[in-house]
Amino acid sequence: AYVMYTSGSTGKPKGVVVSHGEIAMHCQAVIERFGMRADDCELHFYSINFDAATERLLVPLLSGAQVVLRAQGQWDAEEICALIRAHGINILGFTPSYGSQLAQWLATRQQTLPVRMCITGGEALTGEHLQRIRAVFQPELFFNAYGPTETVVMPLASLAPHVLEEGAASVPIGSIIGARVAYILDADLALVPQGATGELYVGGAGLAQGYHERPGMTAERFVADPFAADGGRLYRTGDV
């Protein structure tokens, strides 16, 4: 289906190979999880070199919904808000920081811009960003998504709360989407006790094939799933 280049933590670009079956499974699972509708209209916000751009183009179209493309380099808050109003856009997907900035721009003008759904991803959703986005866009549904490119856009998502739990730094990343699994494991690939620190591993049907022409790196990051009987794989996210 595509090869998406990402530098990750290494700083060196590597091509992540994703098949048609993997992105198709993911998109269908997102449609069901998010409750996409044919009368939706989504602003396509992400740069094409970010894998979320693929999902947020295909998911609305596969649902019979509309997609409105912003112009290249169109980041100005006034222009974006005018675009949302002109097209009756009711789904917004953006990074928490940009969504918060857009909400702040509207708030300083004592304006709200209610939508049906907000979707954030790409970085942690802090309590400050959560409250600011909720206050201005007033979404009926607010999803916070997580996922490295190697796990095909976002293998996990949560319905964002109205306020963070006391002591929490950010909104949880939630539960798996589609035919996937997720584990918190130690260095020996054993499950850690609840509350203990470990590394997040993601597996199941929604994994990339590996890195383009980099078999050594593929073998290092995509490992055998010790809990699967069918030769399944897990991706080491590096996130603890």
Image (cartoon, grey):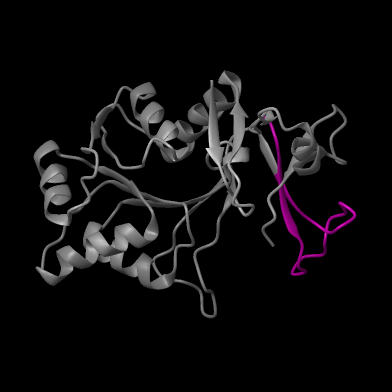
Quadrant of the drawing holding the N terminus: top right
Residue 100 percent location from the top left of the image:
30, 63
Which residue in the rendered view is the most extreme toward the front? Answer: 12
Residue 134 percent location from the top left of the image:
30, 62
Q: Is residue 178 left or right of residue 79?
A: right
Front residue of this view, candidates 87 and 178? 87
Residue 66 percent location from the top left of the image:
25, 28
Residue at 52% across, 73% down: 169
Q: In this view, does 203 lie to the left or right of 62?
A: right
Residue at 61% across, 46% down: 12
Residue 213 highlighted magenta (yes or no): no
Q: In this view, does 132 lie above or below 62?
A: below
Residue at 75% across, 36% down: 218
Q: Is residue 193 left or right of residue 239?
A: right
Q: In this view, does 11 lie above or below 132?
A: above
Could you say which quadrant of the image residue 99 lies in? bottom left
Residue 221 percent location from the top left of the image:
75, 43
Front residue of this view, candidates 115 and 216? 216
Residue at 53% across, 33% down: 4
Residue 203 highlighted magenta (yes or no): yes
Front residue of this view, candidates 165 and 107? 107
Quadrant of the drawing holding the C terminus: bottom right
Q: Read off the magenta span.
A: 182-205
Q: Is residue 34 left or right of residue 84?
A: right
